[in-house]
Amino acid sequence: MAVSPLNPLAFARSLESIGRAVGGLLGAEMMVYAADVLVHTEQDPQLVDALLVRARQMDPKGHLSLDRILRNAAGRGDWLSLADALATAVDLVDSDEAKATLVAQRAEVLGRRLGRLDEARRLYIEAAHLSSSLAGAALAAADDVEALLGGRVTHEAPWPEVVWPQPAFDPLIAAGDPTAGMAEQPALDRYRARLAEGYDASVFAGAVAEGLELGVVDVARRVLPGMSTAGRLAELEGLIAAADAGGDPEGAARFRAAAFAESPVSAEYYAAARRLFREEPHAHARIEVLLRRRRVLESPSDREGLLSELAALMASAGHPR
């Protein structure tokens, strides 16, 4: 790519241009990454907001763009925008636990920051109904709000700091499907149906091998959608250990590549996925690997380097969809 990451504004503009050309979910993600570059270099907050709004327009159900809107609103103390964005976030998650966390976060903003106590109390009660693990803290907060409404303060801190996870809004990201918009693979349907009848390690291994051949990065999730991430990772690590013990380094490398989607923080699994999908027919998979890895990087320099590679790959691949 011609633009150097050392020129953040030009780099962000280049990412924005590519995002507009690509469109859809992947284009929206590029808009978000352009905004990230500006945020990390503390440049042009107005352009950051404009990029995120554009990302939401391109992909209204996008989790990543809404996550950034939430974080930016929280960072600058724009509580009204934060409350509105949290209301939108609740509609984008499926599990009751994730909904409860976001509902409780919105209750805190409405009550603590905006003084809308009636709404805060109602939302805390709603969160308690949604999640048994949050019920105690949410109901205690609702009781304290009721005490405030009645002029009775029962605790020093009426909003206990128990329903605001760090980093904020993780339920939204966890509920998103961090892919490059790849379609479902009908070839994996028979494996998913077979595994739904009862788990079989050999069937799972065959599904992983076939899925990787098709360029499916998150093949384990696709054939075992009902299993937790930790469970799928444990099964893949069992296959890795068996392949290593059986003297099958190629098989072990494939299973490590499949494990990347379940554990993108692992440098070992990331390297395996990059090696597996380095050939031209798997350009979509290479893009998805970079997108997934991008979300777990902490270092701004690492993020910029990955974004440069991602943008160059997208430009060379033409229209990734």
Image: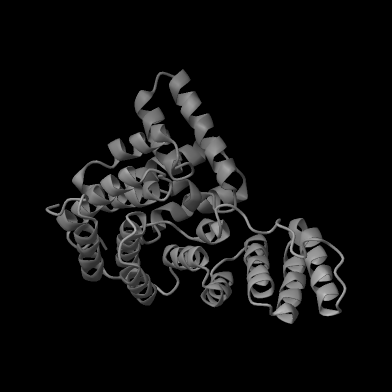
Please state if 76 lies on the left or on the right of 196 as rendered. left
Q: From where the camera sits, is residue 310 visible?
A: yes
Vertical arrangement, residue 63 with respect to residue 252, above or below = below
Where is residue 267 shown, x and y percent of the image? 40, 34
Judging depth in this view, the residue of 111 and 224 nearest the camera is 111
Q: Residue at x 56, y 71 (%)?
A: 86
Q: Residue at x 41, y 50 (%)?
A: 295
Image-quadrant location for residue 186: bottom left
Vertical arrangement, residue 286 with respect to residue 118, above or below = above
Q: Residue at x 44, y 44 (%)?
A: 207
Q: Quadrant of the C terminus?
A: bottom left
Please state if 42 lies on the left or on the right of 156 as rendered. left
Q: Residue at x 50, y 58 (%)?
A: 173
Where is residue 44 shown, x and y percent of the image? 30, 66
Image-quadrant location for residue 155: bottom right
Judging depth in this view, the residue of 288 and 40 nearest the camera is 40
Where is residue 279 shown, x and y percent of the image? 21, 42
